[in-house]
Image (cartoon, helix red, strand yellow):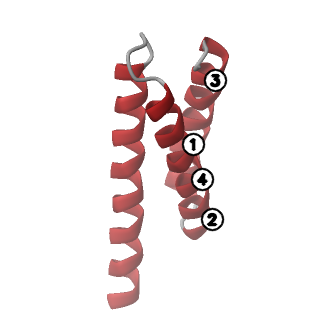
Amino acid sequence: MVNQQQVDRLTEELEDLRGAVVRDGQQMSDRVEKLLREARELHQESHGTAFEPALRSVENLLGCVQRGLLAKSSLRKAG
């Protein structure tokens, strides 16, 4: 069962990641992938709980960040 501490930790990681994405590239891609896996697992576990909407949002946000990093990487290689 998902608890508040898990959600808080994931939120803190997201905040750290947001700043790091601006500075770094490939290193952040690995970190995003790890967080996305964790968010997906927590979201699956949270079905029917008060945490489900927040974890769905986190999972969607991380998916967007991951796609953005992949696009950025592709543009750099093409350029």
Q: CA distance from mark 1 to mark 3?
A: 10 Å
- In the visual, does 59 lie left or right of 36? left
- Between disc 2 and disc 4, whose residue precedes? 2
Looking at the image, residue 58 sits to the left or right of residue 10; the answer is left
Residue at 47 percent of width and 42 percent of height: 40
The secondary structure type at the circle numbered 4 is: helix
**Circles 2 and 4: CB distance less than 8 Å?**
no
The alpha-carbon separation of the residues under discs 2 and 1 comes to 17 Å
Are circles 2 and 1 on residues that touch, CB within 8 Å?
Answer: no
Question: Mark 1 or mark 3: which comes first in sequence?
Answer: 3
- The three-letter code of the residue at mark 2 reads Gln
Type of amino acid at the residue the image marks with label 3 = Gln
Real-space Cα separation, disc 4 to disc 1, in angstroms: 6 Å
Is residue 79 visible in the rendered image? The answer is: no
The residue singled out by tag 3 in the image is 6
- Mark 4 surroundings: few (<14), some (14-19) or many (≥20) residues within 10 A: few
On residue 34, which mark appears? Answer: 4
Which residue was labeled with disc 1? Answer: 38
Q: Residue at x 57, y 42 (%)?
A: 38
Circle 1 packing at 10 Å, graded few (<14), some (14-19), many (20+), is some
> Disc 2 versus disc 4: distance between alpha carbons?
11 Å
